[in-house]
Structure formats: C-alpha cells, structure tokens
Amino acid sequence: MDRMGISAALERAGRESRMRGKGNFDDSRLDDAAQFPIAAANHFGHVHNSPDRITSNLPALHLYQLSIRAPAPPSNSFDHTAADRGRELFSGKARCTTCHADPVFTEPGWNMHKASEVCVDDFQANRAPDHAYRTAPLNGLWTHTKGGYYHDGRFATLAQVVNHYDTCFSLGLTAQEQSDVVEYMKSLPRRR
C-alpha cells in the first residue's frame, strides 16, 4: 500500500468507524493469574466486540506508523567528527549492531532479551508477559533528554549506558571510544 492508500484507509477509518477502542484482542499470556491477577480475573486477554471497528484498520495504521521518520538531530547537538568515529565503533568493536541494526537501529523481528543477556536485574522484565526487555530503537534518541535511559531509566546518561555494555560484554572500549559511540547515537538518524 502506498502513501495515498494509507492516507485513504486512515481517512476511511476515521470517518466511518471512529474506532473508540472497540475491537478484538487476544493474548493468552494475560491468563496467568499469578503474574496478572486482575487481567486473568477479568479476561483482559480475550476481548471481543461486535462490531470490531479496529482489526480491519490495523494494516493501514501499522504502515502509517512505520512511515513516520524519526526527526534528525540539530546539526549543533553532537560532535560530527566524534560521531564519524563512533559510527565505525558502533558496527565494529562496540558490537552495537548485534541488536541495533541499521537502518531501524533496533532488532528486526523478535527484539526481546532476557535480563541475563544484557547484564541487568529482571524486575521490570518480569512485569511483562514474556519476561524480557525490548531492544529500544535508537533513531531520534537525541529527543530523549529527561527521565533517564535504558528500559527503566536506570542510567542517567548515554555514557552510563555505553559503559554498562562495555562492562557487560567485556568490550574493552577506551573512554574516548565510549564517548565517540555516544556522539554517534546522538547523531541518529543520519540522513544520507
């Protein structure tokens, strides 16, 4: 579906149905009464509405969501030379592209990891149905300036995140290399 098709489908969805949250939802993971007692007791994992005003609109909404480009950072918000060095490190020595693949800077497909895979506790992960952490997309990361970084905000700065992974994966990055990786992340998305 091209942009015009997406636009037409969204227009139709808005004009015809005014979805108002009336659709069908099935996720049997929410049936686990030990982890999700309220959801299990109220069958939140099995919601069915008639008419279903959402399901037929999901493909167009998904395409629209994927078509929104992350904003490019202001030119003066990062060190360009350091970011160029960081780009090489990001896909090389720092091994960031293992999980943050270009051009989306997250993992294609199932982008979830157990806490032990990323060297953190599982407190937040255990609140999710799959007990895992999502690989956060990095495009537009420069817009995130408050509340901390990582899955639960545990790191106050990007430098702390990079240092964590340097330690976790025994990468052996120097302080300058860590700083360069930070500058590269602040430069995303880079327009080609």
Image: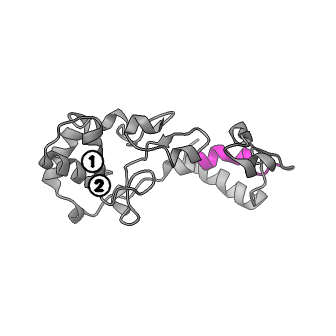
Residue drawn where x is 76% and y is 45% of the image:
40
Q: Amino acid at mark 2?
A: Leu
In the picture, residue 102 is in which quadrant? Answer: top left
Place of residue 118 in the rendered image (x, y in percent of width and height, measured from the top left): 38, 39
Mark 2 residue element: helix
- State the CA–CA distance, disc 2 to disc 1: 6 Å
91 versus 16 height, above or below: above
Residue 187 seen: no
Crowd around label 2: few <14 · some 14–19 · many ≥20 (10 Å):
many
Place of residue 185 in the rendered image (x, y in percent of width and height, measured from the top left): 28, 51
Mark 1 residue element: helix
* Residues at circles 2 and 1 in contact by the CB criterion of under 8 Å: yes
In the picture, residue 171 is in which quadrant? Answer: top left
Stretch in magenta: 52-62
Residue drawn where x is 42% and y is 36% of the image:
116
User: Where the N terminus falls, by quadrant?
Assistant: top right
Toward the viewer: 170 or 11? 170
Q: Is residue 22 left or right of residue 126?
A: right
In the picture, residue 152 is in which quadrant? Answer: bottom left
Toward the viewer: 114 or 94? 114
Q: Is 58 within the magenta?
A: yes
Crowd around label 1: few <14 · some 14–19 · many ≥20 (10 Å):
many
Tag on residue 158? 2
Residue drawn where x is 67% and y is 46% of the image:
58
Mark count:
2
Place of residue 24 in the rendered image (x, y in percent of width and height, measured from the top left): 77, 45
Toward the viewer: 55 or 5? 55
